[in-house]
Amino acid sequence: MIRGPPGVGKSTLGTIFWKALPNGAVVEVDSLRHMQSNTGWQENFKNYKFAIKQAVMLVNSFLHDGFFPVIIIDSFEPKIFTYIKQYLHMPYIVITLMANQEELIRRVRGREKGYKNEADILNIRIQLLNDNLNDDIVIDTTNLKANEVFERINEIIKLGQLKELKPIDS
């Protein structure tokens, strides 16, 4: 699982992983949230839980059909993380991506699409910083390029005895 506040680089990293996973899959919860009609970025908790449940069902299906590794991406705010563990019945690694406040705001202001409410984003960042999962791995992306973050996560995957990933140049 890769989590972090909006603007930290999760979707960019998801694209890199998607290209690098010849037998794997990337599930972005945002894509599932956008499939629901009449919901936006501020949808209610019930709709968010539904998207999480659907994402985990996809993860389970991919794994059942032989895809590996499977990466699920979302902010996974503290209020939802307990919920997701009810449905995720397999070993997993949680990687939390962070960036300092100034860099996060710079990235959000430079976005063409995606969530842009700076106050909400900084609030999510604080929630994630205060959310102690005990077993998550935190990567500060402030001064890193997306490929450097990919390489760090690849090392973590290798240490976890998972299949090594190689980026595919586009």
Image (spheres, grey):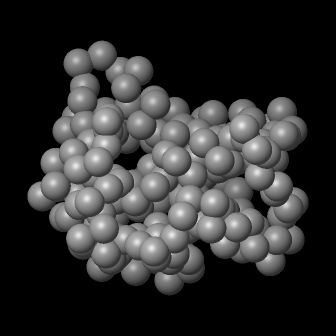
Q: Quadrant of the N terminus?
A: bottom right
Name the residue: 83% across, 33% down: 65
Name the residue: 67% across, 72% down: 152
**Residue 156 shown left or right of residue 161 in the figure:** left
Total labels drawn: 0
**Residue 52 shown left or right of residue 116 in the figure:** right
Residue 63, position as x, y percentages in the image:
78, 42
Name the residue: 32% across, 35% down: 113
Q: Quadrant of the C terminus?
A: top right
Residue 154, position as x, y percentages in the image:
74, 66
Residue 68, position as x, y percentages in the image:
81, 47
Name the residue: 26% across, 60% down: 106
**Residue 106 shown left or right of residue 92 in the figure:** left
Q: Can residue 55 be seen?
A: yes
Residue 167, position as x, y percentages in the image:
77, 52
Front position in the image: 96 or 58: 96
Front position in the image: 48 or 16: 16
* Residue sitting at the far left: 119
Front position in the image: 120 or 114: 114
Q: Quadrant of residue 67?
A: top right
Q: Can residue 63 be seen?
A: no
Front position in the image: 48 or 30: 30
